[in-house]
Amino acid sequence: MAASTPTGEPLPYLEITDEDYGRRAASEFTVDEVRSDTLILRGPCPRCRASLEIPVVTTIVHRGFFGRRLRRVEPPQPADQVEPMMCMCEDDHPNRPDRRYGCGAYWTVIIPARPS
């Protein structure tokens, strides 16, 4: 159920964060590993409560020297990953700029490293 103002109107778009957003996301989101290098974080936006699915890629690809080839680079040791997140819902939020999504909320969560 989407959050609304006390008058029942949809929450207006507002680029905002709060320490509580990260705590709420950490407790309410689920993490599904869809591939060995891709996670899907699912849960409600901590501000507007819209249902979100956020892909997180845990392995990166870098260009080789001189742009000749690509190579896969994995971290040498498992490490916790700090992941910035933002609401990307398609719900109606008044005053949202063109070509933007979400309610404007953003936060970070820590994705614990997988045990090796």
Image (cartoon, helix red, strand yellow):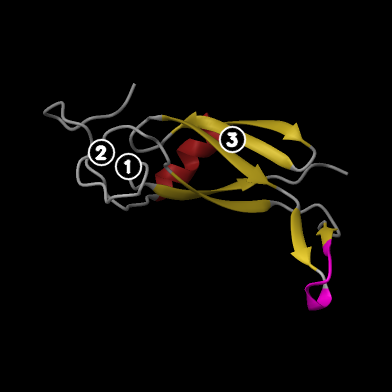
Amino acid residing under circle 1: Cys
Place of residue 84 in the rendered image (x, y in percent of width and height, measured from the top left): 53, 52
Q: Please give the range of residues in magenta.
A: 65-70
Q: Is residue 93 left or right of residue 85?
A: left
Residue identified by numbered label 2: 93
Place of residue 17 in the rendered image (x, y in percent of width and height, measured from the top left): 37, 51
Of the residues under marks 3 and 2, which one precedes in the sequence?
3
Tell me the residue at 39%/30% (across/down).
50
With respect to residue 98, does 39 lie above or below? above
Q: Gap between marks 3 and 2, in whole Å? A: 22 Å
Of the residues under marks 2 and 1, which one precedes in the sequence?
2
* Nearer to the camera, 12 or 63: 63
* Nearer to the camera, 71 or 24: 71
Tell me the residue at 43%/41% (across/down).
88
With respect to residue 58, does 62 lie above or below? below
Of the residues under marks 3 and 1, which one precedes in the sequence?
3
Q: Nearer the viewer, mark 3 or mark 2?
A: 2
* Crowding at mark 2 (Cα within 10 Å: few <14, some 14-19, many 20+): many
Residue identified by numbered label 3: 41
Q: Gap between marks 3 and 1, in whole Å? A: 18 Å
* Crowding at mark 3 (Cα within 10 Å: few <14, some 14-19, many 20+): many
SS at mark 3?
strand
Q: Are marks 3 and 1 in contact (CB under 8 Å)?
A: no
